[in-house]
Amino acid sequence: MIQMDATLVAAARSLAAGNPLGALNRVALRGDAPALALRGIAMAQLGDLVRAKSLIRSAARAFGPRDAVARARCVVAEAEIALASRDLGWPAKSLEAARQTLEAHDDRLNAAHARNLQVRRLLLIGHLDEAERLLDGFDAAPFPPASSAAHELIVAGIAMRRLRTKTARAALARAERAARHAAIPGLAAEVESAARLLDTPAARLIAGGEERLLLLEDVEALMASKALVIDACRYAVRDGDHVVALATRPVLFTLARTLAEAWPQDVPRDTLIERAFRMKHADETHRARLRVEIGRLRTVLGALADIDATKRGFALTPHRASEVVVLARPVEEEHASLLALLADGESWSSSALALALGASQRTVQRALDTLASAGKVQSFGQGRARRWMMPPMPGFATALLLPATLPIG
């Protein structure tokens, strides 16, 4: 077993307090395994993730075969670095094995941290059900304030994605208290940033020819209303608990949205053809195709609404709902879900973006090239080391923009 001397203990305390420079002052010249691990964590806190990853791996190799707990802690540290650098392809099974090792050796604090990392990764790639299952029944109260704050941030993140704003606000209030107690400026700033998401526009309501921005709690209220919602944030049609997903059927969704924007009026056939097929000049072939697609839309929306033919086109008629509205992104953008991921200010690889969006890497790369040409994203590095980033989107929450799963076009 590795023994922690006074210098290592002091360095570890500095890291726990969010003081990486204080830790480096104590261990910067040491090359033993525990010091390498602490140096790696310090470099990660300072933002040098490449150097941090190298040091953590060196520490893992330096620990002996009997140091299972220390090696497991290194795996957890490397997983956190991978998450911070948006390396979503990092082997999740290694983190699960490390967590089990830590739990078996009664290292509850680091095991809890490993669990939080697992949940954060699942949340980032839109696997909310798995994230909730992993978090179910977990109590962060016995842990230090910094760990409790991190846990509550995750709870708030899931609640915001589920449109449970009261739960999110309560979790953020607990996170704020814990962060204040921990006295770590970076953690307090992260909590403050998350709390601002609840007070910035998350979506845009289009109804009756008018538009207005909605906060997340407004979206929650809308979803609980009696309106038929054409959800352009999730590419679905909703009426209460009944949801028709159209993320993989963009033509049908475009038709549904166009009809909803005009409700209760009808929409001319040529307008539907132009919007759905991107054809400015319609002929009989396009009109025949429109009839086919309208028939398909009638079938998928059968339980929610009718689509009636009119003299000049088609009109949407809800079965139960008292009104029809469109819920759109705050700002319309061809690659909005891709930009929403990049809006966290971190640097992403194209493979990580593809994994998070559930799209092919080639499709994502084409979208990135288009956005780069427009000056909306930038890259650095070459080959497999190439990373993409952008400044955060000012003034808009991204909770509704993140994948669930969404097309990137």
Image (tube, grey):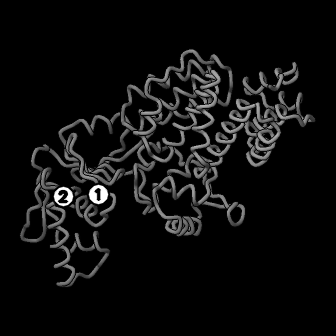
Task: State the image coordinates of residue 166 (x, y, percent, origin top left).
Answer: 38, 26
| Tag 1 secondary structure | loop
Direction from residue 80 to residue 246 in the image, left or right: left
Q: Residues within 10 Å of mark 2 (few under 14, many from 20)?
A: some
Q: Residue furthest right?
A: 29
Vertical relation: 308 (above or below) 52 = below
Residue 289 visible, this angle? yes
Using the image as rendered, state which of residue 268 and residue 111 is in the foreground.
111
Q: Earlier in the sequence, mark 2 or mark 1?
A: 1
Task: State the image coordinates of residue 337 (x, y, percent, origin top left).
Answer: 46, 54
**Label 2 amino acid?**
Val
**Label 1 amino acid?**
Leu
Direction from residue 65 to residue 357 in the image, left or right: left
Labelled pair 2, 1 in contact (Cβ < 8 Å): yes
Using the image as rendered, state which of residue 89 and residue 224 is in the foreground.
89
Residue 199 visible, this angle? no
Task: State the image coordinates of residue 71 (x, y, percent, origin top left).
Answer: 73, 35
Q: Residues within 10 Å of mark 1 (few under 14, many from 20)?
A: many
Residue at x-position 57% and y-position 15%: 142
The disc placed on residue 300 is 2
Vertical relation: 135 (above or below) 390 = above
Residue at x-position 28% and y-position 63%: 254
Where is residue 55, by image quadrant? top right
Direction from residue 123 to residue 205 in the image, left or right: left
For mark 1, what is the residue? 246
| Tag 2 secondary structure | helix
